[in-house]
Amino acid sequence: MKKFVGNAVASAASVVKIALMSRRPKRSAPADKAKSIVILGNGPSLLKTMERSPRWLASQSRMAVNYAALSKEFWQLRPDYYAMMDPGLFPMPDPKDTSLSADVWREFRTVDWPMTLVIPSRFLPVARLHLDGVGSITVKTVNITPVEGWKWLAHFAYRQGLGMPRPRNVMIGAIMGAMQEGFGKIYLAGADHSWTRTLSIDEDNNVCNIVEHFYEEKKEAQETARIVEAYRGLHLHDVLQSLVVAFRSYFHIKEYADARGVEIVNITPGSFIDAFPHRLPPKEKADQSDDCTT
């Protein structure tokens, strides 16, 4: 009875959120097993995957995320898709803005290959302003409205493009965006998610964390300040609860993916995500075992 009431309340809340927050819904395309994509998280292990399987990686559709455009590897990877979900990545255009977020949009203006930008629906007007005159980038939207409660209702909302499991990080939105595009096989690279290894508390009881990426920080002081600001005012239990929500969302994604016939494989060495099967991509220089293309 308690579970039924909990699901009923969560479902009712989700319906209200959809009505208030979701816009421009796009129904998910049917899952096509012949279509595969590698979502490139920004964890430090991505470099290992690039070194292990460069030809395999080049043969796949690729989706980069967040601040990857500021790395030199972005120009090597030349992703077909690029996902951004964080509201902080959508400032209004300003030539005087020297923030990391503004730098990402400046890099986009120099992209010389076809790339699809996947963003929350509510930021479409801002994206259009930034990309005015940029012919190489197409914008597609997703609704990041959190949907919980009864599974049938949640899956209906996901399929109709009305929302997704609680999107506590960009990887969740990227996976849902890939499924919306009809990809039947999704590989997760650079999805280390090993944040608990670097969590600490300073002498003033502030939560501290060193977030490692695969790329060198061009503006290390700005990146450090951004992370400090993100943790400002939070207690350790707040941070850990946020991680609980994120890792639980992957299990909701797994249930939905299974229902749709979508295979999600985690190819990140040492990843903390435990919702999807782990399998390394093909090693091209020596041992050809663990080939995830079969």
Image (tube, rainbow, N blue to C red):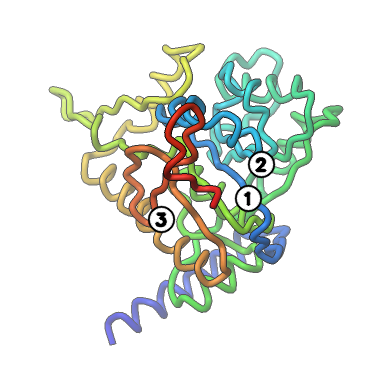
Q: Residue 212: x, y in percent?
A: 37, 25
Q: Secondary structure at mark 1?
A: strand
On the image, the x and y values in percent for residue 49 come to 47, 31
In the figure, 54 relative to 292: above or below? above
Given the image, on which type of amino acid does mark 3 rest?
A: Phe
In which quadrant will I find the N terminus?
Answer: bottom left
Residue 102 visible to an observer of this rendering = no
Across and down, in percent, residue 236 comes to 21, 40
The amino acid sitting under disc 2 is Ser
The residue pinned by badge 1 equals 36
Residue named by callout 3: 276
Which residue is at the front of the view, 293 or 138? 293
What's the amino acid at mark 1?
Answer: Ser
Within 10 angstroms of label 2, few (less than 14), some, or many (20 or more) residues? some
Q: How far apart are labels 1 and 3 at the CA level?
A: 16 Å
Pointer 2 residue:
61
